[in-house]
Image (spheres, coloured by chain):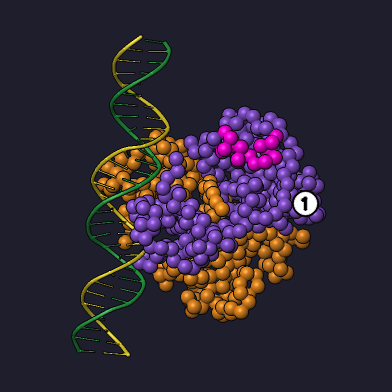
Chain colours: A orange, B purple, C yellow, D green
Amino acid sequence: MESKYDLIKQDIANKIIHGIYPASSYLPSENELCDLYGTSRETVRKALVLLLELGYIQKIKGKGSIVLDVSRFVFPVSGIKSFKELNQSQNMHSTTKVLTLEPRLVPTKGFGLDQNSELEATYIERLRTINDEPIIIDIDYVLSKVVNDIPKMAAENSLYEYFEDQLGLDISYATKTITVEEPTERQRQLLKIPPHKDVVVIRSMTYLNDTTLFQFTESIHRADKFSFVDFARRQKLKGH
Amino acid sequence: MESKYDLIKQDIANKIIHGIYPASSYLPSENELCDLYGTSRETVRKALVLLLELGYIQKIKGKGSIVLDVSRFVFPVSGIKSFKELNQSQNMHSTTKVLTLEPRLVPTKGFGLDQNSELEATYIERLRTINDEPIIIDIDYVLSKVVNDIPKMAAENSLYEYFEDQLGLDISYATKTITVEEPTERQRQLLKIPPHKDVVVIRSMTYLNDTTLFQFTESIHRADKFSFVDFARRQKLKGH
DNA sequence: GTTGACATCTTGTATATACAAGTTTATGAT
DNA sequence: ATCATAAACTTGTATATACAAGATGTCAAC
């Protein structure tokens, strides 16, 4: 099922996380890794490219692969991660309260959609607390075309876990925008936003492997509790 | 100098941008691309992987590579991009005014550094306007170890262009955090921030290819003009 | 019409090989 | 000791080959 280079990636990643390969040290050379895992060099290199993209290592021609300081990512809101995954990687006491779960149409405005399209969806509104403080309101529109029924349990636990492990959906990529906006009165109350204070809104559209759109998300954060951590590699795209 | 797969990547990317390969259509198959460019399949595949990471295409096993709607990225603040690059890709009238350019030590606090380390740097403070409105204050600490002299022209034009094209620096990756904070009085005046309104702060540390840190950046945005667009691929990292 | 087997597309994984091009170390001549 | 060269490492690029596995269409059998 899982490919060799994926297993190698995970093995090396774990060794980095646990300090077996400490930061700013060199990994074994590619040829040594070949011997270690009993594979060809190209296979090892595929694993290393994945670690490179994740910001775990830096490859330097002629020298080797340096382990980067990955402890900076202890608070990774980057990438597509679910609240539960986020929560497990930290050590925090958090809860999820499902406020609403009902069928609704996706609002044509707000996500930049065609006006004529009427998309049936399951609307889910959840309040996330960390250490008993309300921090995030998560609003999901899950398109009924893809998922017609969502048990409340799944919403309380983890939607992604339900979609991927239970339904076998292949969630692949998402586009997201981050903006700062005035909260609605409801949001102000739920998140206990002081007067004059804004909220951070992360809107995303999530797609399956076959490029079918299946979910809209609005994540409303208390601005004072908001932090977005990102790792970016420089890549030039000349043109035009 | 430039590799085949990089040229193929750029060629296909340009064709996607110009609509020769329109959104939601399939690219030619990998074998057809081999014939087209006269290369092996692995070389073509390397180019496609790069386009995949950029969010230009989606590969589907057994079917082909679908072109994604890339027009959503017309406002890409994602990745490492300089203000000038950003400006050129849009069509806006913008200016850059250099407020300060002088040697300074990097403040030990604020970037989470060791207290004992005293890093000499060039301090640059710039005010960015778009359509005559002040939008962004950019603060740079460029480490003197790497770059000892920065002409004012370079700061007015593009620091990255100067670093990469003039000095031949190999800028490779950066870590960045986005938070919402109260502006200083100076920031409030420069950006004309109304009372009670916050600003968005993007702090980043930029590294060269050989993992040497060379730049700290603080980018202060007017919250009402701030927008961050991102493309993210889902990748699970199991294991603890 | 429906079904199932098959062939033929597609992309995904894995290997072996070769050479180019940085980096470091060892060697040797001066 | 100094310097230049060469050898021995490292990663980067490119190719050829093989098979696995998903998607699709054809064709025959029922």
| Local secondary structure at mark 1 | loop
Which corner quadrant of the image does residue B163 belong to?
A: top right
Q: Position of residue A162 (x, y in %)?
A: 45, 70
For residue A34, side relative to residue A205 (left or right)? left
Question: What is the quadrant of the N terminus of chain B in the image?
Answer: top left
Residue at x 64% of width, y 51% of height: B88
Q: Which residue is mark 1?
A: B132
Prevailing secondary structure of the magenta residues: helix
Residue A102 visible in image: no
Q: Vertically, is A141 above or below B126?
A: below
Q: Vertically, is B129 above or below B28?
A: above
Which chain is disc 1 placed on? B
Category of crowding for the residue at label 1, using alpha-carbon neighbours closer than 10 angstroms: few (below 14), some (14–19), many (at least 20): few
Q: Position of residue B72 (x, y in %)?
A: 58, 62
Residue B145 visible in image: yes
Q: Vertically, is A104 above or below A221?
A: below
Q: Position of residue A130 (x, y in %)?
A: 59, 59
Q: Amino acid at mark 1?
A: Asp
Residue at x 51% of width, y 71% of height: A214
Instruction: Identify the magenta region.
Output: B152-167
Q: Position of residue A215 (x, y in %)?
A: 53, 70
Decide which of B114, A57 is in the foreground and name it: A57
